[in-house]
Image: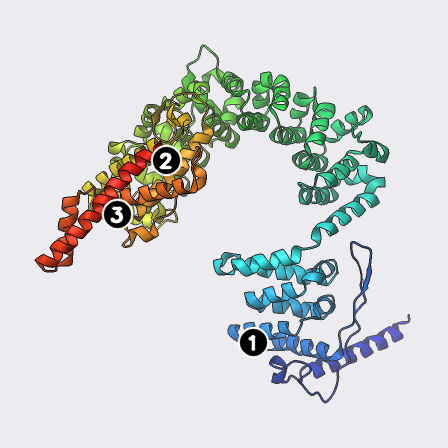
Amino acid sequence: MSEENFVKQGERKNGKNRWRKKECLRFNADCLTKSPSERLTDKIVKPRKSSKHLHVSTEQTLIVRKQVDPETTKYFSEIANLFEGTTVDLDDRSAICGNALEETRGKELELATDYIISHTLQTLLEGCDIDHLCGFLQSCAKEFHQIAMDKSGSHVVETALRSLAVHIQDEGAYSVIGSTLNKICQGFPDLLRYLIAELLKCARGGIATLLVDEKSSYVMQTALRLLAGEDQELMHAIPILLGCSEKNIAKGKFIEASMVQDILATLKDTAYSHLMEVILEVAPETLYNEILTKVFKNSLFEISCDHCGSFVVQALVSSARCQDQIELFWEELGSKFKELLGIGRAGVVASLLAASQKLHTHENKCCQALAAAVYSESEPPSCILPRILFLENYFSCEDESNWSWGKGDKMHVLGCLMLQTVFRYPSEFIQPFVTSITSLEADHVLEVANDAGGGRVIEAFLSSNASIKQKRRLIVKLRGYFGELSLHPSSSFTVEKCFSASNASLQEAIASELLDVRTALSKTKQGPYILRKLEIDGFATRPDQWRLRQTSKQSAYKEFFDAFGSSDTKSSGSNSIFGESSSGTRHSKSLKTMKKMKKDVEQCLAYSNAPSLGSQLPVIDSSITRFDMSKRGHEKANKIVRESVELDLDNNGMRIGNQKRKRMETDATGNSAAASKTTENARDKKNRRKENGSISSLKKLKK
């Protein structure tokens, strides 16, 4: 094309654009409130021709998109010019966007896939309210996947979902958002299967190259995660990604001996190792077991020594399904804990500890191996916990035997994670770790509590099966610092755990320290919660009643535990209620049961301050009891808790008797003596019936 013709063509294009802009500026306010069919126009503006997109559904049906009619095109052109040319008030903008979206009903596919109008739609979806936004999405639900696959429509979908995410914080919108998402997701599973099947079919020839490419590997990872739980689809897709032939897949034979070395060599690649991690996470059990025994067996330590390979081993161990698989991991890695920690592969050790705890096997061996990795028998057990907390510093020290706690050093994330896992083991396996944490000096305990990871270690210890005496030995070392700790978001949880595990005198000491910083604490994010949880305001105004209330709580916990606790938890050698046990008997499920019971009792006691107590008390969760109880039995349990709270506690949490209750009621009414006496007699009879009924019901229900 000559330069002259090029210039002329440009002038014609510019002239046409100026004419279109001039026509668009002829804006009539009626277009905001009236539909295109209601408006009379002197001239019809010829629309731009939109490209026709072909959409292929899961059934391979060709769908030809219709062109947008000229009148609708003009309407949305005027809307676009309104937002571009003037400043619209926020409220007016929302109303205009809502009205304009109503005009899209039945035409969503054509409008969203039009190159020009799709931009206007994006503006409308960003400015409308939640009702019009969800209305648009629900109206186009049947064509949603077609819009999403279109070049222009995909941007509309992205904008709509992003706008939807903005309203997630509004609890009142949960219902409409949930129904909208459910509606637009129908049909998608079949489309996903078809998409992945076609993707693998087309990529089969160059699969080896694609798997080591960062972007294509990420696509495959996403696809596999979306197929999680679809075992039939995964049994077809994963072997293809591993390089299996179609013939072997059809015969149910997946991994051949000739493939193993290629797979192991490729694990050193970052993109492929990420993909392998996902494969191991989502693989059906039979395929996972075959990969484990044919690919990884006898090579676990060698793979763990590689930077990328170590993450694959972590995924492999974390995805273990049975105790036999843990046995295989232990045989190859159990004696290598020190070597793995020394070369910076703590993640492999941490994953084996977690898998051992999850499947309840090799726990004692794992504890012994971890302790042996950081100290020798000639050294005191007190050095175990500090060395694991500062794992990297310890193993980077030239003379490990002379390593000492460095003030201000950052604690090792995986070291803290391993200690949290250890404290979930039965108490007889973790005694060296318990001895070590209770032997820490006071300033070291404070430093651990101030660290985000270290604080979680203390919390894990306070939630463990260690004896209450051992726990309080650690808690007393933090006296004088609870106020300071409560001001920090992470360590405030540690303060709460310390309070729960303390006796009456320690609880009062903690409450007193928090009272000193109440003003500053109330201004923090976590402050109002912990002040309410520990009832600091009540402690400040009525300390004697606060003490009685704490005693009442413990009494209520004990009575409830005696009545409804299972025989397993009762015989577990617990030194205190709700699972603080010095016995090594496994009762993790019982601990969860008791904690749920404790929570329900706390809720009931918390409602004792409410003016209408009987109608507001929460119902005990029927899933918390381990013995068989009929529906009627659960109702009795709830009744017992309600009645015990009503009878035993006044509005400030004090335990009161019937005589004092009658005097309080008389003073409160201020009625005549005769009326007061009548009221007292009626209430006294009612209380006696409740008292007798609750005591007898408690005993019968226990039997």
Q: Is residue 374 above or below residue 637?
A: above
Which three-letter amino acid code belongs to the residue tagged 1? Thr
The residue sitting at 76% across, 77% down in the picture is: 69
Front residue of this view, candidates 143 and 225: 143
Q: Mark 1 vs mark 3: give the one in front.
A: 3
Q: Secondary structure at mark 3?
A: helix
Which three-letter amino acid code belongs to the residue tagged 3? Asp
The residue sitting at 67% across, 35% down in the picture is: 277
Any mark on residue 87, and which?
1
The residue sitting at 46% across, 19% down in the picture is: 429
Is residue 278 visible in the rendered image? The answer is yes
Q: Secondary structure at mark 1?
A: loop
Label 2 or label 3, whichever comes before in sequence order: 2
Any mark on residue 537, and which?
3
Q: Quadrant of the N terminus?
A: bottom right
Give the CA distance from mark 2 to mark 3.
19 Å
Label 2 or label 1, whichever comes before in sequence order: 1
Give the CA distance from mark 2 to mark 1.
55 Å
Q: Is residue 677 above or below residue 99?
A: above
Q: Secondary structure at mark 2?
A: helix
Graded by Cα atoms within 10 Å as few (under 14), some (14 to 19) or many (20 or more), the crowding at tag 2 reads some
Front residue of this view, candidates 191 and 415: 191
Front residue of this view, candidates 622 and 111: 622
**Mark 2 and mark 1 residues within 8 Å of each other at the beta carbon:** no
Location of residue 133 in the rendering, given as x and y in whole percent from the top left corner: 59, 65
Any mark on residue 300, and which?
none
Q: Label 2, on which residue?
A: 497
Q: Quadrant of residue 506?
A: top left
Looking at this rendering, what residue extends furthest in the bottom direction? 42
Which three-letter amino acid code belongs to the residue tagged 2? Lys
Q: Quadrant of the C terminus?
A: top left
